[in-house]
Image (tube, rainbow, N blue to C red):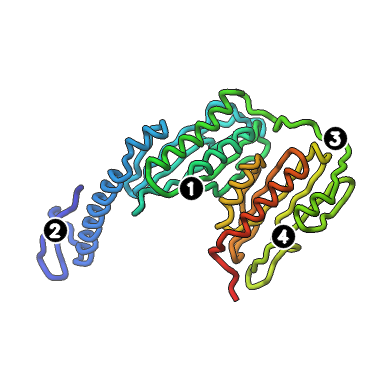
Amino acid sequence: MYCKCYLNLHPAFVVSKDYTAITLEDVMLKSFVCRTTILLGLISSALAADLDTARIDQLTGLKGKFNQKEGVYKVTFPRSDVKVVVDGWTMPPFMGLGTWAAFTPTKDGAMVMGDTVLFEDEVNAAMSAALDNGLNVTALHNHFFFDHPKVYFMHIEGEGAVDKLAGAVRKVYDAAKQIRAASPNPKDSFGAARLPEKSSITAAPLNEIFGAQGESKDGMVKFTFGKPATMHGVKIGKDMGVNTWAAFAGSDDNAVVDGDFAVTEDELQAVLKSLRKDKINIVAIHQHMTHEEPRIMFFHYWGRGRAKDLAEALKNASLVAGLQEVSSPLQN
């Protein structure tokens, strides 16, 4: 590293070796910057060594780059295996179709954060791979309109040993690759049996499972459960949009359920795991509000099967949510 040396001629005035006059304050500032730059360089080198970047490359199967300034090692690859057309334009991967995972050291090993580019039929396999291998799934959403095939972005996060994190990231990527290996072109259906034209869901068994009276309409049944929160000092709940709901259609033995879960940040991962264990598909994870207390995350889902089985899966997930600790409780 290069730092300029200065010759003192007067307590408040110095001249550099190229005889350019500068103030003493300038010298002190430049000296501080030089020392800080050297220190940051040494720290960054140590951080890179702590991460074992060669091991990350080996486990993820990718060649990463180290950002010395931020102390972050990042692996990335473009989703170039499937042609994506957005609003009639074939989109180059450079324009936003890049999957990445970034690692930074912590006192207990490392933290990983990443964004994974997925097609509709890959999302839930990749999500299960993440959840089953110790990663948190923190968001699932789209970036485009009029995209064919539809593209989704799944954000992941985790902390722990570098080997465990890098191995988990690789399993997420491999889950998507396995889907594409079996079907090079993304599917446009879950592949479940066709639903009847007219719904005929029997409400009584579902009422019993949820311990509530569902709203019935044209052979369909819907349940809505509020969650207390505040926003800008105002109490908000079920009718203000802070709710978990489930709507059933089809027949008792060939049903569909769709809906929305409202959960705290601490509840999110456990509820996702519970629903994925019961083969409920997650289709979006995001927030609906800002400045609410506690912070509420919303995720949307879609399930197929027997109505009672679907209801049991949702009830189990609701129980899991009720047992989780709330990190940001309502203020009294």
Mark 3 belongs to which amino acid? Answer: Pro
Q: Position of residue 28 (x, y in %)?
A: 20, 64
3, above or below 95, in the image: below
Residue at image location 62% in from the left, 42% down from the top: 276
Image mark for residue 170: none
Residue 133 located left or right of residue 88: left
3 or 4: tag closer to the N-terminus: 3
212 or 109: nearer the viewer: 212
x and y, in percent, of residue 184 in the image: 60, 23
Q: Amino acid at mark 2?
A: Tyr
Q: Tag 3, which secondary structure?
A: loop
Give the CA separation, mark 3 to mark 4: 30 Å
> Could you tell me which residue is drawn at 60 percent across and 70 percent down?
330
Residue 288, given in percent of the width and then of the height, sits at: 65, 56
The earlier-in-sequence mark between 3 and 2 is: 2
N-terminal label among 4 and 2: 2
